[in-house]
Image (cartoon, rainbow, N blue to C red):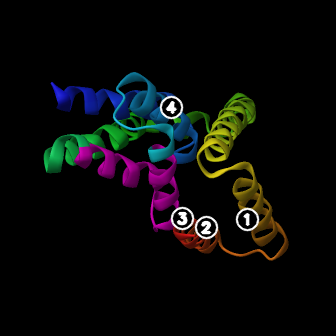
Amino acid sequence: MIYWSIFLAFFIPGILGYGGGPASIPLVEKEVVDRYGWMTTQEFGEVLAIGNALPGPIATKMAGYIGYMEGGVLGSAVALFATIAPSLLLMLVLMVTLLKYKDSPQVKNITKLIRPVIAVLLGAMTVQFFITSTESSGAVQTIILTIISFWMLEVKKVHPAFVILLAIVYGGVAGLI
């Protein structure tokens, strides 16, 4: 039964998360944290941070890890398949239709309509992570990390993987003090 739960936890966000991994992350969080209780918000945030630091698609990395933690190697395979299955099926079924209507203004406008929804979902998740971080690490540590990360990303144009790695190191050092 755990494999069916793992499949649903990643298949449903895969269907609803138009836009790839970043768009489906809040939906996966809802399933993994709220629905099944496999991890806390903080643990999910840590998995997300590690997933962001590694190369490749984030959704599959997170699915593989969470699936493995809940169901071993088979759980990992089920989660990976469930993550890519909606896209794979949709590509196969709709390829002919998309090629036929690719220049249609209606098709081009779909993306414009969905982007604000994805932005709101990512914003809500960011606020939730910020609140959780403030509660667990303290407001000062969270604000310092936020300001330094923003400065490195936007002013210095440091690659996000390095910012995440430095934040992990900072968290480890701050945890020792």
Q: Where is residue 38 in the image (x, y as percent from the top left)?
A: 33, 34
Q: Mark 1 points at which residue?
A: 149
**Magenta stretch: dominant secondary structure:** helix
Categorize mark 2 by other alpha carbons within 10 Å: few (<14), some (14-19), many (20+): some
Front tag of 4 and 3: 3
Of the numbered discs 2 and 3, the one sitting upstream in the chain is 2
Identify the residue position indicated by label 4 in the image. 27
Q: How crowded is mark 3: few (under 14 residues within 10 Å), some or many (20 or more)?
A: few
CA–CA distance between discs 4 and 3?
30 Å
Please report contact status of discs 2 and 1: CB closer than 8 Å, yes or no.
Answer: yes
Q: Is mark 2 on a helix, strand or loop?
A: helix
Please identify the residue farthest to the front as the structure is shown.
177
Q: Nearer the viewer, mark 2 or mark 3?
A: 3
Considering only order in the chain, which callout, 1 or 4, is on the residue closer to the N terminus? 4
Residue 46: which numbered mark, if any?
Answer: none
Residue nearest the observer in this picture, 64 or 147:
147
Give how far apart the Cα atoms at labels 3 and 1 are: 18 Å
Q: Name the residue under label 3.
A: 175
Above or below — where is 73 with respect to 32?
below
Disc 2 marks which residue? 167
Residue at disc 4, secondary structure: helix
Residue at 31% from the left image edge and 27% from the top image edge: 8
Highlighted range, magenta: 44-69
**Could you tell whether 69 is left or right of 148 in the image?**
left
